[in-house]
Amino acid sequence: MATFPTRGDKKEIEEGSDFAPKFDADGLIPAMAIDAETREPLMLAYMNEESLKLTLEKGEAVYWSRSRQEIWHKGATSGHVQKIREIRTDCDQDALVLYVDQIGEGACHTGRSGCFYRRVDLPETQLSFTEEGRRFDPDAVYGKK
Amino acid sequence: MATFPTRGDKKEIEEGSDFAPKFDADGLIPAMAIDAETREPLMLAYMNEESLKLTLEKGEAVYWSRSRQEIWHKGATSGHVQKIREIRTDCDQDALVLYVDQIGEGACHTGRSGCFYRRVDLPETQLSFTEEGRRFDPDAVYGKK
């Protein structure tokens, strides 16, 4: 796989047209997946260089699982792949937004459309559900855990 | 300031109503700010426990600046504060989404409405601008750097 360009100076990074992503000390860059149709945030996960390249090659979101320490092709088990519609990077190119077509019933392993299904109620800092029910049975889709 | 509840087991974290955010090894949690009106992603930054508490107290986004290693009340210099409309957390409570009313012309220090103003063109991995011009003069707003 090709490597990404060397990161230039601040002006090149912020105003240039070279995609030169910055990976942190752990070799990771955060990626927020957003439903391309509904514009709802689906999940926030991380990519290392290899998974980002795989994402670009496959046109589907491939993350790095920090808990399992392995490449994580989202949907490989569940079928709930995320087809890449568009990728954005930010000013200093150390974060990504993925606009995706979420295949299947949802992105979240809890059975919901996305992972951000609870709102923090101020000022009590208690959570309220914004998506109470489940759209699919996680045990059936991911296997009993 | 009060502390957040101790994190319980997986079921409590995912299905409970206690807000028990998880901070990473550096004491940080990523927060994606999204414009509450346009639903456009504005910026991705980080909070430590203190800045998250300040955010909840003030009702305005307060981050932790990793580059300056200090509390960063967004807009304190520029006036471009982010009024918190709603905060969401994800299934394992290690990421936040902030729906904000972005005060002023924009969130990004480059003079744009948000930081994700470039699209990665596949498969060349060149960047195209989705917001070409500037909405404000960063030198005037932030001071010459």
Image (cartoon, coloured by chain):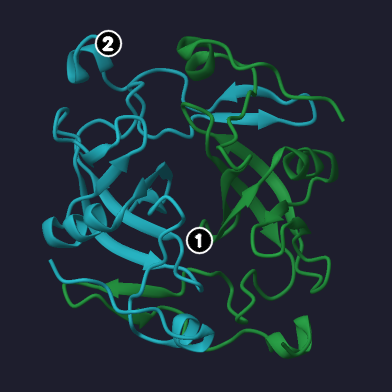
Chain colours: A green, B cyan
- Give the percent coordinates (x, y) of residue B104: 20, 34
Amino acid at dot 1: Glu
Q: Which mark is residue B145?
A: 2
A80 left or right of A98? right
Relative to B37, does residue B78 appear above or below in the rendering?
above
Report helix, strand or loop for mark 1: loop
Question: Residue A48: which numbered mark, if any?
Answer: none
Residue A140 locus on image (x, y percent): 77, 89
Q: Quadrant of residue A69?
A: bottom right
Q: Residue at x 50, y 15 (%)?
A: A15
Which residue was labeled with disc 1? A40
Identify the chain of the residue marked 2, using the numbered disc in the image: B
Image position of B13 with respect to B141: above or below:
below
| Residue type, mark 2 in image | Lys
Residue at 62%, 84% (x, y): give it.
A135
Q: Residue B137, can we see it?
A: no
Q: Secondary structure at mark 2?
A: loop
Mark 2 to mark 1: distance in Å?
36 Å
The answer to whether residue A122 is above or below residue A102 is below
